Image (cartoon, helix red, strand yellow):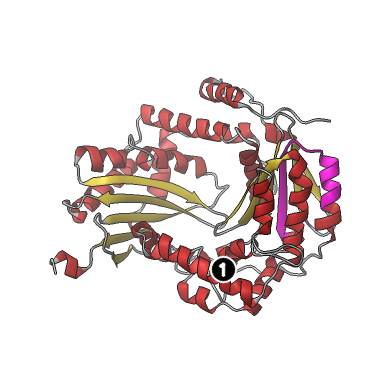
C-alpha cells in the first residue's frame, strides 16, 4: 500500500499554523508514522518510507561510529568520511561522487561524536546505482597507503583552516576538554594533528572492520521508490555482508565536575571571545525540552537575553549566541560572546554571568516562554519539508532510541514546558561549580603593542 504523500510547502505552512494554534491533544499528520522497519539476518536495519509526490529519493547510511569510539588514534571516524570517496575494488577514486553528480544528484557525508552519515539525494531511477555504489565501498573499500596519504593531507588542511586558523575553532577545541576530562567527547571530531599524522594503514583497517559492519549500520530510504524492489536489492548486496562478532565501545563515564574550570587561548583575533559550557543530560532525557526553551530564551537570536544585554544595551559585545548540544552519552549547554575590540572581556563576562544568574533566580516571562515554544514547534514541523530531512529524522531517532518518536509526542513535550521548568533546569545545570570557561584573547605581546 502506498504511503501518504509527503509534505509540500503549503502543507508545511498549514502544519506550522496548526502547531501554533492547535488545542492540546490535537493530532497532526506525521509522514514518519508510515515508516517500515526491516532487519536483515546479519543485523542491518533498513527504514523505508514511500512518497510518490516528487521523483526524488533520499538514501542515508548511518554508521554507529563517531569520534567517541576512537581509542589509539583520534580522527579515524572523520578520516573514513573522506576515504570512503577514494575508490574501491571496482570504482576509481572520486568516481562514486562523479556518477551521482552526473545524474543531477547530491552526495555528501558528515561525522559527529556519535555517528558517521553518508547520503545521496537522487531521482528515482538512480536509486539502484546508489545502492550498488554504497555496497561496493563498504564491501571493497581501498584502504591502502596511497589513499591514506592522500586523505591525510586533505584532513590536515581542513583542520588547519577550520580549527587551527579559526578563533572559534580554537575556542571549541579548548572548551570541550574542560567539559569532559574523561569521556571521549573531550577530543575533537577531526582529531588531534599528531594522531592524524601518525595513523597507520593497519589501524585504519582495524577500525573499519570493527565498525563498518552491517550490524552497526542503519539505512534510511525516503521518497519515490518501490520498497519491495529496494529491499530485494539491499538483501542481495548489504544482506550478504558478514556481521562483526564484537563492536568495541569506550567504557569511560565522565565523573561529576567539582569546581569551575578555566582556560585562556592566545590568538591574534580582532575580537576576543568568551565561551562557557555546562554539563547537560543526553538526548532523550526528560529535561531536554525545557533546556531547549532555556537556550532559545537565553542565547538564540538577536532577541535573546544575552544578545540584548551584551550587544544592544551595554554595547560591549559584537555577538552573543548559544545552544544546547545533545548527544547519545551526554549533553552540553553552550554560550558565547564576541567581545568588541574596544571593550573589556572582564566586563563582558560580568554581564554574561549576570544574565545566567537572572534566569536562575527569576522565572522567564510568559511572553518569552510562549515565543520560545512557538519557535521550537515551527522548527520541528519545518523539518518535515523535504525527504532528506525526514530520512535524517527517522534514522537518527531509530539509531538513538530504537524507535521513531511520533511528531505529536515531541510537540506535546514542548507545549508542556512551564516557566517553572525553565527555571528548574537553569538552577539544576547552570551552576558555577560545574561550568567551564574559555577566554580567547590576543597574545600578551599584542596587548603591549609590541
- The residue segment tinted magenta is 216-234
Q: On the picture, is 49 further left or further right than 237?
A: left
Per the image, the residue denoted by label 1 is 151
**Spot occupied by residue 21 in the image (x, y as percentages of width and height):** 52, 20
**Spot occupied by residue 251 in the image (x, y as percentages of width and height):** 60, 69
Q: Residue at x 63, y 67 (%)?
A: 249
Q: Is residue 395 above or below residue 251?
A: above
Q: Is residue 110 visible?
A: yes
Q: Residue at x 71, y 70 (%)?
A: 209
Give SS at disc 1. Answer: helix
Q: Residue at x 13, y 67 (%)?
A: 448
**Residue 383 occupies which quadrant of the picture?**
top right
**Residue 310 occupies which quadrant of the picture?**
top left
Q: Residue at x 41, y 49 (%)?
A: 428
Question: What is the tally of numbered marks visible in this picture?
Answer: 1
Q: Is residue 206 above or below residue 186?
A: below
Residue in front for this viewpoint, 102 or 219: 102
Q: Is residue 374 above or below residue 278?
A: above
Queried whether the magenta region covers residue 143, the answer comes back as no
Queried whether the magenta region covers residue 226, the answer comes back as yes
**Spot occupied by residue 390 in the image (x, y as percentages of width and height):** 64, 39
Residue in front for this viewpoint, 71 or 351: 71
Q: On the picture, is 98 further left or further right than 169?
A: right
Quadrant for the N terminus in the image = top right
**Spot occupied by residue 331 in the image (x, y as percentages of width and height):** 49, 54
Quadrant for the C terminus in the image = bottom left
Label 1, residues with CA under 10 Å away: few <14, some 14-19, many ≥20: many
Amino acid at each position: 500500500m502506498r504511503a501518504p504523500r509527503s509534505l509540500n510547502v503549503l502543507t508545511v505552512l498549514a502544519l506550522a499554523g496548526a502547531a501554533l494554534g492547535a488545542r492540546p491533544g490535537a493530532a497532526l499528520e506525521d509522514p514518519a508514522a508510515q515508516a517500515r522497519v526491516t532487519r536483515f539476518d546479519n543485523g542491518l536495519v533498513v527504514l523505508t518510507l514511500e512518497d510518490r509526490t516528487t521523483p526524488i529519493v533520499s538514501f542515508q547510511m548511518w554508521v554507529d561510529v563517531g569520534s567517541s569510539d576512537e581509542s589509539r588514534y583520534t580522527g579515524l571516524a572523520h578520516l573514513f568520511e573522506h576515504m570512503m570517496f577514494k575508490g574501491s575494488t571496482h570504482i576509481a577514486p572520486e568516481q562514486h561522487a562523479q556518477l551521482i553528480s552526473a545524474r543531477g544528484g547530491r552526495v555528501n557525508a558528515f561525522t559527529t561524536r556519535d555517528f558517521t552519515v553518508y547520503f545521496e539525494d537522487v531521482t528515482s531511477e538512480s536509486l539502484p546505482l546508489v545502492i550498488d555504489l554504497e555496497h561496493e565501498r563498504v564491501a571493497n573499500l581501498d584502504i591502502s597507503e596511497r589513499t591514506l596519504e592522500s586523505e591525510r593531507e586533505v584532513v590536515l588542511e581542513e583542520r588547519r583552516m577550520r580549527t587551527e586558523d579559526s578563533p572559534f575553532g580554537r575556542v571549541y577545541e579548548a572548551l570541550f576538554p574542560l567539559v569532559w576530562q574523561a569521556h571521549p567527547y573531550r577530543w575533537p571530531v577531526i582529531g588531534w594533528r599528531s594522531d592524524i599524522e601518525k595513523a597507520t594503514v593497519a589501524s585504519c583497517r582495524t577500525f573499519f572492520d570493527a565498525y563498518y559492519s552491517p550490524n552497526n549500520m542503519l539505512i534510511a530510504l525516503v521518497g519515490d521508490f518501490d520498497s519491495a524492489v529496494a529491499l530485494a536489492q539491499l538483501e542481495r548486496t548489504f544482506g550478504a555482508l558478514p556481521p562483526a562478532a564484537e563492536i568495541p565501545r569506550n567504557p569511560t563515564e565522565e565523573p561529576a565536575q567539582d569546581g569551575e574550570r578555566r582556560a585562556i587561548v592566545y590568538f591574534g583575533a580582532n575580537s576576543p571571545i568568551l565561551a562557557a559550557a555546562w554539563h547537560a543530560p543526553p538526548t532523550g532525557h526528560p529535561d531536554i525540552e525545557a533546556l531547549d526553551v532555556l537556550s532559545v530564551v537565553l542565547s538564540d537570536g538577536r532577541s535573546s537575553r544575552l544578545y540584548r544585554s551584551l550587544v544592544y544595551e551595554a554595547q560591549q559585545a559584537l555577538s552573543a549566541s548559544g545552544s544546547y548540544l545533545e548527544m547519545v552519552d551526554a549533553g552540553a549547554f553552550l554560550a558565547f560572546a564576541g567581545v568588541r575590540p574596544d571593550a573589556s572581556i572582564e566586563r563582558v563576562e560580568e554581564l554574561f554571568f549576570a544574565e545566567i544568574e537572572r534566569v536562575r533566580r527569576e522565572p522567564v516571562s510568559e511572553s518569552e516562554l510562549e515565543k520560545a515554544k512557538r519557535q521550537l514547534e515551527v522548527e520541528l514541523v519545518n523539518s518535515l519539508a523535504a525527504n532528506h530531512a525526514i530520512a535524517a529524522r527517522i534514522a537518527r531517532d531509530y539509531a538513538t532510541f530504537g524507535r521513531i518518536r511520533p511528531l505529536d509526542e515531541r510537540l506535546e513535550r514542548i507545549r508542556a514546558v512551564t516557566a517553572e521548568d525553565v527555571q528548574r533546569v537553569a538552577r539544576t545545570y547552570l551552576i558555577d561549580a560545574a561550568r567551564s570557561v574559555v577566554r580567547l584573547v590576543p597574545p600578551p605581546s599584542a596587548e603591549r603593542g609590541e
